[in-house]
Image (tube, grey):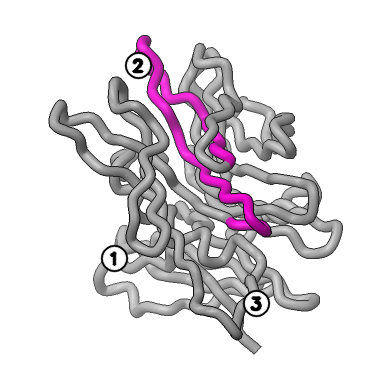
Amino acid sequence: MKTLFKMTAMAVAVIATLFCLASCKKIKNESKTPTVYAGGYVYNASGKLVATVWKNGNAQALSDGTTHAYVSSVCVSGTDVYAGGITMNDSGKAIATLWKNGTAQALSDGTTHAFVNSVFVSGKYVYAGGFVNNASGKAIATVWKNGTAQQLSDGTKSAAIYSVFVSGTDVYAGGFVNNASGKAVATVWKNGTRLSLSDGTTSSYINSVFVSGKDVYAGGYVTNASEKDVATLWKNGTAQALSDGTTDAYALSVFVAK
């Protein structure tokens, strides 16, 4: 996991589904049997990934299986079910895709790769976080708000968003930005303003962001001097190592319960 693309698209789809556990508002429904949603993919007989959402164990296919597609994140608001991920076009480009109640909306034009890694719904606003490759092949960290893209990096170095979280009127996004030395720097953006959580001497990434009150938590990992990835939790920018660095370890999702 030293580079942006070391994980395959299939692995990202499985892992990113964990992120949405920390990406949606908690839905209180204590008096009724809870409804449980899961997002990911199913291989069809042709070996294509079919974007899928399960509701209480019942599968709903979101793509027709003619090209690869998968769901990375699920978020439910009221009676609406949102899913974010990708659909491959006939040219083999990944299209950032948002599904609402099974209906797909393309968030990118398909000329370059683009991915949705996280979805968060706050009131009437639907946020999707991920990245879009530019013509030079650099990933641009991107947040879509109701389908409109906001670029959080300038495209000179690769950057991506893996998690989006909204608290009040503040929009947080977590991921990384490559520095001039080619090292990934763990990064949290608040309303588009970037905060670096590491010094960039080794690579580091944010996989999940969660905000509780005034505290901002981020989970991910930092590569140590021995080239081992150390699972790391940041609270308000201060890092806490969660593993000893003797073997690779990763924090993929963060949730705060009070």
Q: Nearer the viewer, residue 102 or 20?
A: 102
Of label 3 and label 1, which has the lower sequence position? 3
Q: Amino acid at mark 1?
A: Asp
Q: Are marks 2 and 1 in contact (CB under 8 Å)?
A: no
> Which residue is located at x 43 percent, y 56 percent?
17
Neighbour class for label 2 at 10 Å: few (<14), some, many (≥20)? some
Q: Is residue 240 left or right of residue 247?
A: right
Q: Amino acid at mark 3?
A: Lys
> Which residue is located at x 43 percent, y 64 percent?
252
Residue 132 location (% of width, % of height): 56, 28
Mark 1, secondary structure of its residue? loop
Residue that label 2 marks:
92
Query: For residue 248, which numbered disc appears in the image?
Result: 1
Mark 3, secondary structure of its residue? loop
Mark 2, secondary structure of its residue? loop
Mark 2 vs mark 1, CA separation in Å = 32 Å
Q: Nearer the viewer, residue 256 or 188?
A: 256
- In magenta, the rendered stretch is 76-100
> Which residue is located at x 63 percent, y 55 percent?
79
Q: Which one is closest to the eye, mark 3 or mark 1?
A: 3
Neighbour class for label 3 at 10 Å: few (<14), some, many (≥20)? few
- The C terminus lies in which quarter of the figure? bottom right
Residue that label 3 marks:
28
